[in-house]
Structures are given as C-alpha cells and as structure tokens.
Image (tube, grey):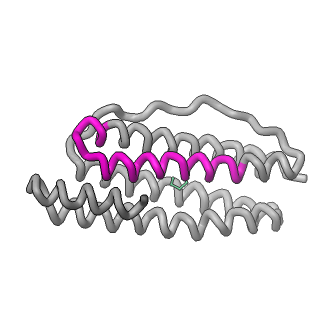
C-alpha cells in the first residue's frame, strides 16, 4: 500500500509526464509549421513516449491499489524564437523533469517504499538518456546555426534517427 505522500507525488508525476507530452506536441506543431518534418516527427514520437511514461506510473498506482487523480495539464507555448530556442527549452525542460524524478526517488527512500524506489530507478536511468538526446541535438542545431541547407540536412537526419 502506498503512503499518502508517495501517492500524491506519483499523481503529480503522472501530470508532469502528460505535460511533457503536451510540450513536445506543441513543439512538433511549430516545427511542422516551419517546414521541418524531421524535427516535427521526432517531437511527435517523443509526445508518444511521454504518454507511455505517464501510463507506467498510472498503472503502478492502480496496481498498488491507489487512487489516480488526474489534474489539469498546464498549457504550452505556441511559438518559439528559433529552432535553437526549441532545443534549449527542451533541454531545460528535461532537466526540470529529472529534478522531479530525483525528488520522488528521495521521498520513496525516506518513506522506505522499496517498490516505488524500484519503479523510479527506471525513470532515473531514462532521464539520463532524455537529457543526452536533447543536449546532443541542441549542439548540432547550434553548429549549423541559420544556414538553411544545413538545417535541411539536419532535419532529415534527426527525423530518420527516430523512424
Ligand atoms: Fe518523461 O521523460 Fe521527458 O520529460
């Protein structure tokens, strides 16, 4: 059985993961509008992945006999200054999510909730990959700058990396 504090934090994390999905969907729409189908596709795949992250916790809460409480999902920007802005925000966002995961893990440790710690271990590892992906693509985007033929190339490359 989940302690109240852990249950509340898990429900918050379901919301945070769904918000992440929303963040990526908004970015996908912006990229599509800028004729960047590769980046749009990457973001859309990430939208799906974030929903899977939310559902993994959702299923865990139900398996533990807890109550799932779905709160409103915060809105996301519709416009960005540039492709670099998109990826800077992505990296910042993933770092914030990592901080939330670490906080949840620490809470589970404090409450001696070993099952939630085991679940959160998966997210700790996943966040290393999430930050690395965002950071790698941000570096590439910075490298090409505003050169349109390079942006065309990197768009196709990023899109293919996730087909
Ligand atoms: Fe759920 O990993 Fe990104 O936010």
Above or below for 29 versus 147: above
Would you place residue 78 above or below residue 87 in this image?
above
- Tell me which residue sits at (67%, 57%) in the image: 104
Q: Please state if 102 lies on the left or on the right of 23 as rendered.
A: right
Residue at the image position 23 percent from the left and 41 percent from the top: 35
What range is drawn magenta here? 30-57
Q: Position of residue 44 (x, y in %)?
A: 44, 46
Q: Is residue 53 magenta?
A: yes
Among the 4 quarters of the image, the one containing residue 144: bottom left
The image shows residue 64 at horizontal and vertical percentages of 87, 51
Q: Is residue 116 magenta?
A: no
Residues 69 and 163: in front is 163
With 109 as the anchor, is 82 left or right in this view? Answer: left
Q: Is residue 87 rendered to the left or right of residue 126?
A: left
Which residue occupies 71% across, 51% down?
A: 57
The residue at the point 57 percent across, 44 percent down is: 16
Residue 83 vs residue 3: left or right? left
Q: Position of residue 108 (x, y in %)?
A: 75, 61
Quarter containing the C terminus:
bottom left
What is the total number of numbered labels drawn onto the structure image?
A: 0
Pinpoint residue 130: horizontal percent, then vertical percent: 47, 62
Main SS type for the magenta part?
helix
């Amino acid at each position: 059985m989940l302690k109240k504090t852990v249950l509340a934090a898990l429900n918050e994390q379901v919301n945070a993961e769904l918000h992440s999905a929303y963040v990526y969907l908004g970015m996908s729409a912006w990229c599509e509008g800028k004729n960047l189908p590769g980046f749009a596709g990457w973001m859309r795949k990430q939208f799906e992945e974030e929903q899977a992250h939310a559902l993994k916790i959702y299923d865990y809460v139900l398996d533990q006999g807890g109550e799932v409480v779905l709160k409103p999902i915060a809105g996301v920007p519709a416009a960005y200054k540039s492709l670099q802005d998109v990826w800077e925000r992505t990296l910042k966002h993933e770092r914030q999510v990592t901080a939330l995961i670490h906080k949840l893990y620490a809470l589970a440790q404090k409450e001696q909730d070993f099952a939630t710690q085991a679940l959160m271990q998966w997210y700790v590892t996943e966040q290393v990959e999430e930050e690395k992906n965002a950071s790698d693509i941000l570096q590439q985007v910075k490298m090409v700058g505003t050169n349109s033929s390079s942006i065309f190339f990197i768009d196709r490359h990023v899109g293919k990396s996730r087909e």
